[in-house]
């Protein structure tokens, strides 16, 4: 297991020995947990990336609470595309943004490295770290 802490105490954990079930049983205690799945089952293919992000919350509410998140999302041109046409990297970001808009404090994602280049993996971890610091997300667990 590899762990990385950021300045505000949030961590990104890379766990190669566990699976979702054991992590869920070990850490789950409330509704502050969110999950990202590599098979993209939570993405609705006929909606845009932006519509997928704001499925559960109002964009106006998020704009008031998290203006930097809206700015970060708006800088990504792919959010305007229909979800069925998004690349794996983009679909993971869509799911991550959705969980951040829902104020999830613990985010667990399954193995997605197989579908991403090294550069995409690095960009993804940088984006996770940036948002974790900005919104004081306690930890992001990446299960390999």
Image: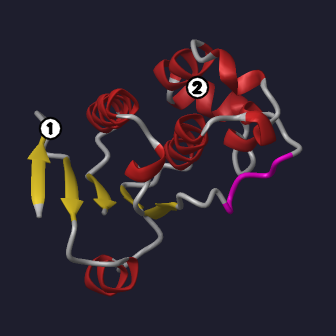
Residue 122 position in % (x across, y down): 30, 31
SS at badge 1: loop
* Res. 108 image quadrant: bottom left
For residue 42, the mark is none
Seen at 89% across and 44% down, the residue is 46
Seen at 53% across and 57% down, the residue is 38
Which quarter of the figure is the N terminus placed in? Answer: bottom left
- Marks 2/1: CA–CA distance: 22 Å
For residue 64, the mark is 2
Mark 1, residue position: 8
First to last magenta residue range: 41-45
- Sequence-wise first label, 2 or 1: 1
Residue 24 position in % (x across, y down): 36, 80
* Res. 107 image quadrant: bottom left
Seen at 32% across and 33% down, the residue is 118
Seen at 29% across and 41% down, the residue is 136
How many numbered marks appear? Answer: 2
Near-viewer residue (65 or 107): 107
């Amino acid at each position: 297991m590899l762990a990385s802490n950021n300045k505000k105490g949030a961590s990104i954990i890379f766990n190669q020995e566990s699976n979702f079930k054991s992590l869920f049983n070990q850490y789950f205690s409330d509704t502050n947990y969110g999950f990202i799945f590599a098979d993209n089952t939570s993405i609705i293919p006929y909606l845009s990336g932006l519509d997928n992000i704001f499925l559960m919350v109002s964009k106006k509410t998020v704009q008031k609470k998290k203006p930097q998140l809206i700015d970060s999302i708006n800088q990504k041109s792919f959010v305007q595309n229909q979800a069925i046409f998004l690349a794996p990297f983009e679909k993971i970001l869509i799911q991550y943004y959705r969980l951040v808009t829902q104020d999830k404090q613990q985010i667990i994602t399954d193995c997605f490295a197989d579908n991403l280049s090294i550069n995409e993996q690095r960009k993804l971890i940088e984006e996770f770290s940036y948002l974790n610091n900005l919104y004081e997300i306690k930890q992001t667990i990446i299960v390999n």
